[in-house]
Each structure stands twice: as structure tokens, then as C-alpha cells.
Amino acid sequence: MKEFTYVITDEVGIHARPAGLLAQEAKKFTSTVMFVKGEKSAKATSMMKLMGMGIKKGDEITVTVEGDDEDAAAAAIEAFVKANL
Amino acid sequence: MFGFKKRTPEDGGASITDKAVMRCSAGEIGQPVRGLIIPFAEIQDPVFSGGLLGQGIGIEPEEGIVYAPMDGVVSSVAGTNHAIGITGDGEMELLIHVGIDTVAMNGDGFATFVAEGDQVVKGQKIMEFDRDKIKAAGKFETVVVLLTNSDDYPDFKLL
């Protein structure tokens, strides 16, 4: 399993557009990508569940990636998060 | 003209949601806002119009009220109150997003009447928005109604 943490710097956090694009990115891989904030977690492939986490600027999130292509998936998701969130 | 049906607003109550706009094996989704239905391709936002985030419709609103278009549980309310997600029967994940790029309005002009986890019934008023404020902010007021997991339903159909 791969894991990284990130602190959100985007002013509005994970709203519709980034959540949707992130879900698309996560769907490119077979690994399970989870976003975790405190007690809440969501599969990154679900735009709605990502939005439901209410992730805002300043929040620290942990992303876990597990599966056959976890190295590539973790790298892609980390790059996406840094570029967009 | 482009193979889509023009719809006209109805009078009175939340009866607008009786009009189904999408259907799949999991159920039917009604029209949440009175106004003219436009095809996704005409929405002034490439992320939505490209269908990348799921299939759905746009509505050019004639009234600033959003009704729940199906029974379900509120799965997300944007911190800025301009978007509401509802999870319905068979895990349908529906997003109603009012206006294009209205996240930038920071909640001004939007009021929601439900919170995450609330049960909603079809026809229930869930949001009001101020059309004049959206226009004054220089944004398109198109309401985007999006089944974010439409890919999961091979029989998904716009009506």
C-alpha cells in the first residue's frame, strides 16, 4: 500500500469540478484510492463521496492507494492533488 | 432543432419534478427546477458539457427554486450552498449544481434547506437561489443536473 498526506491549499477545497476530475483520474487505475480526513473517508472514484467529505482549505488529507498498479496510481493522484488542490 | 425536446414551465407547486428527465434501471429522475431544458453539449463549461463527469441535462431556470428530483439521502451540500448531491435508489449519485463557476460567489445568493444525511422526498424544496445575483456576478445561471455515476447504468437514458 502507498500512502501520502497533503494539506489543501485551494481556496474552495474539493468542490464539484475538482472532485469530478479527481474521480476520472482515479478510474484510470485498478488500485483502490481512498481519501481520508479525520474519521471520514471516501473512494476517490466517487465524485459525490469526495464532495461529501467537505474538504476545505487548510485540511490535511491522507490518501491511500492499494492494488496492482499502486505505484503508478499513487504518483498520478499525488500529481493531480498538488496541481489542483 | 437538435433532436432534444423543448420543455415549458408548469404552474404551481413542485409538480415540475413529476416530469422525468432521466431514467435508468435504478429509477427515474425528475426535473428539479422550472425552466428550459438544454442538452449537455450547450452548457458553457467544458468539464460538464464534455460528459466527463457523467451524463445529464442543463436547465435555463425560470425560477430560483430547486426541488429534490427523486427520493434519497443528501450526500453533500457545497460549503458555498450552490450545489447539492443526493444519493437515490440503487446508489444513483445525482448532483444539482446551480450556475456555472458560481463557486466563486462564495454562497452569496444561495440558500439550502437540507444538510448532509437528511432524507429528502421527491418534490421537496431543497434550495433557493437569487437569479439576479448570479447575473450580476457575470455568471451563467444554467442549472446542471448530473448523474455522476451514469457510467454504472448501461440502460441510462435522457428523456
Image: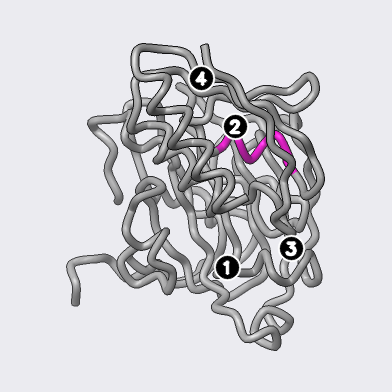
Residues at circles 4 and 3 in contact by the CB criterion of under 8 Å: no
**Residue at image coords 47%, 67%:** B59
The image position of residue B90, as x and y in percent, is 45, 22
Residue corresponding to mark 2? A49
Element type at mark 1: loop
Task: Tell me the magenta residue range.
Answer: A48-55
Type of amino acid under label 1: Asp
Residue corresponding to mark 1? B11
Residue corresponding to mark 3? B128
User: The N terminus of chain B is located in which quarter?
Assistant: bottom left
Compared across the picture, whether B92 is left or right of B77 comes to left
Name the chain under label 1: B
Element type at mark 4: strand
Type of amino acid under label 2: Lys
Q: Let me know if residue A54 is in the magenta part.
A: yes
Element type at mark 3: strand
Alpha carbon distance from label 2 to label 3: 23 Å
**Residue at image coords 41%, 59%:** B48
